[in-house]
Amino acid sequence: MKQSNLKYSCLIAALYFGMNVSAQTTPKDTVTKEQKIEEVVMIGYGARKAVDNTTAVTSLKSEEVAKTKVLNASQAIQGKVAGVQVTASDLPGSTPTILIRGLGTVEGGRTPLYVVDGLFADNINNINTNDILSYDILKDASALAIYGNRGANGVVIITTKSGRGKGINVEYDGFVGVRTPLKKVKMAGSNLFSYYNNLALGTTRFSQDQPVNTDWFDTVTRTGVYNQHNISVSGASEKAKYFLSLNNYDEKAILRGTDYNRATIRTNNEFKISKKITLAQNLSVAFSNITPKPLSVFTSAYKQSPIVPVHFADGQYGVSIVGTDGFASPNGVTQFNNVGNPLAQLELFNERQKSMQMQGGLKLDAELFSGLRLTSQFSGEYYNFKSYNFDNGFRLIGQSPATFNNQLTNQKDDYYNWQLTNYLTYTKTFADIHNVEATAGTETSYRSGINRIYMVRQNLSSNSNYWNLNEVDYVLDGSLKKLNSIDFNENKTVSYFGRMQYKLLNRYLITATIRRDGSSQFSEGNKWGNFPSFGAGWVVSEESFLRGNSIINLLKLRGGWGRLGNQNVPLNVPTLASGVDYNYSFGGAINANGTTNNQLLDPNLGWEITEETSGGVDFALLSKRLTGSFDIYKKITKNIILASMPPSPAGIGIAGYSHLGQVSNKGFEFNLGWQDRLGENFSYSINGNYSYNKNNLDKIFANVNIKQGGSLGNGQWTKYFGEQAVGQPLGSFYLWEANGYDVNGNMIYVDTNGNGRTGSQDAEDRKFFGSYIPKSTLGINIDLRYKNIDLAINGFGAFGHKVYNGKKAQRFSGENIEYDVATDFWTSNNTGASNPAPFNAVPIASTYYLESGDFFRINNITLGFNLQKPVEYVSSLRFYVSAINPFIFQKFSGFTPELNANGNPYELTGIELDAYPSLRSFVFGVNVKF
């Protein structure tokens, strides 16, 4: 074999098996110098030494983010930052929900602002975690006000890697892993199912000697397999720095047929044009390919009877039809539930999704004269999405036949955004005791809004080459059932901002920020808003009475106030209604169609405004081995946007939006860490963080539209928003209170108002029973190192919240039950049972299905073995194994207490229904630098 072919084969083998090819020499003296550099945090449009910062900012470095092998970096920070609650789903491609110091809005956007290398982004699903250099979280208003009307939900600043070192440095990191459900729910087998349902029906419909015992969860799931390969090339010289990375993530998920692939390319370059001028360029492109499957399959697998086979003997999909012999049969006479075949639901669902996202920009830094620097940056983003879903018209036994031979649903989305930022930074020290840094600038941003084409066609060729609209006559063809072309609203924002940071005698700190934003999203007179903030700090340890103290190395007090905005709110656009329903007649004859404004329009609608007051203390003791911080805050959104309807004589049919309420979040955060070295070979660190937050709906100012949310799809709902919700956390469950059983074993409910009617007979008996939002969170992080071996353990817990077992609460006759229900229900001989007598009715929304959401989970255990310069040209070689989510301690009887859904507090968030289970993963990886 030729030498070149041998090298190529070795490289391919290394990529396939996760062997790691990386190169960067890091001499010991370089490490020592880096360790002496003071910690710096990103604060928006600049950076600041942590000791000089007056705001609440937490910074995570690349190794802390990349250690947990997950697709989205935000999932990896769970439990590592106080005051930041991350609720993630293991569904490939999903976006974690991040709440920074609580939830402050009902109708508006809830996600933080992501700033990636200066570009505003909605999420970071397109970012390769290995490319991240630092992940900074701005938490208090004093820090966030620099982002004005985008800062109310917090800001995450992500800085990606750039070139470093001398010469060419190559690094490869790759892993392969397997994934399985972290927790399963034990369901009743065929014979227990038959016994229970016969009692519920009061007749012997099902045989108790069943020939089939299908485990539907096992049928629709598989062992998931995923892998990632990342290779980067970087370097630097006096005139240029360069960084290039290629990444591929591929997963065959636990839900059969669900495949996900993401490939990313990133290039970051910096050029020294002259001694005082630097030009930087960054560009990233991400491609994703997904074959999604409906998550309702998990609910179907829970509910479908185990007496139904996956396939009948003739090869047809098994369905819930029972014969006179009490067995499921294609020739049966009675359909006993409407669940369908979960495997057929997967295999007959044929959707494909593709997307491409490109982000990039240019940044110019120029030193105009000593102490004054100009920064000019242009960033842009383009996104393209395509999907199709082909229904071949096949229907199972007992289902209504399709009215079409086949049906194709097609959707295409695209949008583009750009942003231009220019600012000046002036830094000067006067008389050796006054240090001033002033920043002033302007920013213009443009969001095009999504351009969407949506199409539904029927009875077309099964050959995908003919799935287009070429020469289709809408009238004669008749196959085109729907065609929508939508341009969503564009948004333009112009901003002016300034910040002054002052330090006196290296210990007295003052920060003042102001931003003025103007948005095209709002009407004249409401376009502009001002967002100021103030912060102050006192480095007590720099005072003469503490300086040089061997016990107290750092003691800093800080506090601040600020006003923030949220412009991601419902647009105030009236709906025009027209047509025959609005004809006007004169003299008994129809004259003309009419058009009317059918929605309330509030001329004063603007962004939501949040004000926050906070204070904190940072400390380091015992030669900085013991470090920590404590923060307390009060955050109030005084003008939340809610829907309301005017009195009926107004002739308005659709609710409009106005500033009608107030929400508050109050809490505290605590961080504590210890790090030390025992001898030359062993070092360790133990860090913990705890957060407490009280979320509350303080006020409602007018007749707000009532929300009945958390629908279970069976006529029952679980959440309520209206005047009665004042004093409760957002997203609180509104239920009947279960109160034991009557003489027949049926559930009885508390008569709250004492009128003698209970349960579904009296809706006014409902009460609030807590929210899905945790009151407190806990994170524990342990790192141990002995010689060439390192061990990291991370844990996360959430407490003081509720979750609703929606699958269990959907159950009707003929559907499966949990093993615990089938073996412990009320009978005349078991009146103290945990569950009521078998019943044949839609379960009403009650506390019987509401459970504690408290849990503590080990998020990650990583064991690594490191070799320095194992061979020539290889500076380091690292092997590692990781267990991700290996253990969980939970009270909830369902699959997972982390129920993200879409993050909307009045939809399925906090309800286990059509939810993807949490997964346990084991990975093996290699990292090589050379």
Image: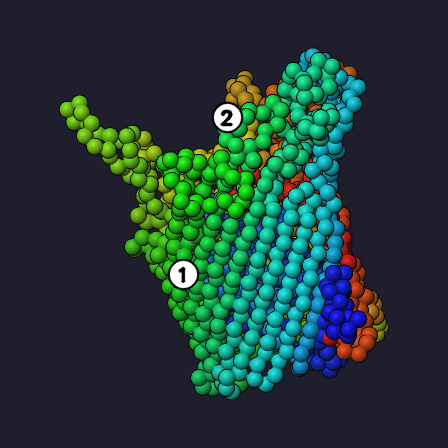
Residue 442, by quadrant, is bottom left
x then y, percent, for residue 583: 24, 30
Q: Is residue 863 left or right of residue 747?
A: right
The residue tagged 1 is 446
In the rendered image, residue 851, in percent from the top left (x then y), is placed at 66, 36
Residue at image location 66% in from the left, 82% down from the top = 166
Label 2's element? helix
- The label shown at residue 764 is 2
Disc 2 to disc 1, C-alpha distance: 48 Å
Nearer to me, 230 or 204: 230
Residue 154 in sight in this render: no
Q: Amino acid at mark 1?
A: Tyr
> Against 394, is 114 above or below?
below
Mark earlier in primary sequence (2, 1)? 1
Q: Against 618, is 605 above or below?
A: above
| Closest to the observer, 253 or 83 | 253
The quadrant of the rendering that contains the N terminus is bottom right
Residue 101 in percent (x, y) is at 56, 53
Expressed as whole percent of the image width and height from the top left, the position of residue 578 reads 29, 35
Q: Secondary structure at mark 1?
A: strand
The label nearer to you, 2 versus 1, is 1
Amino acid under label 2?
Glu
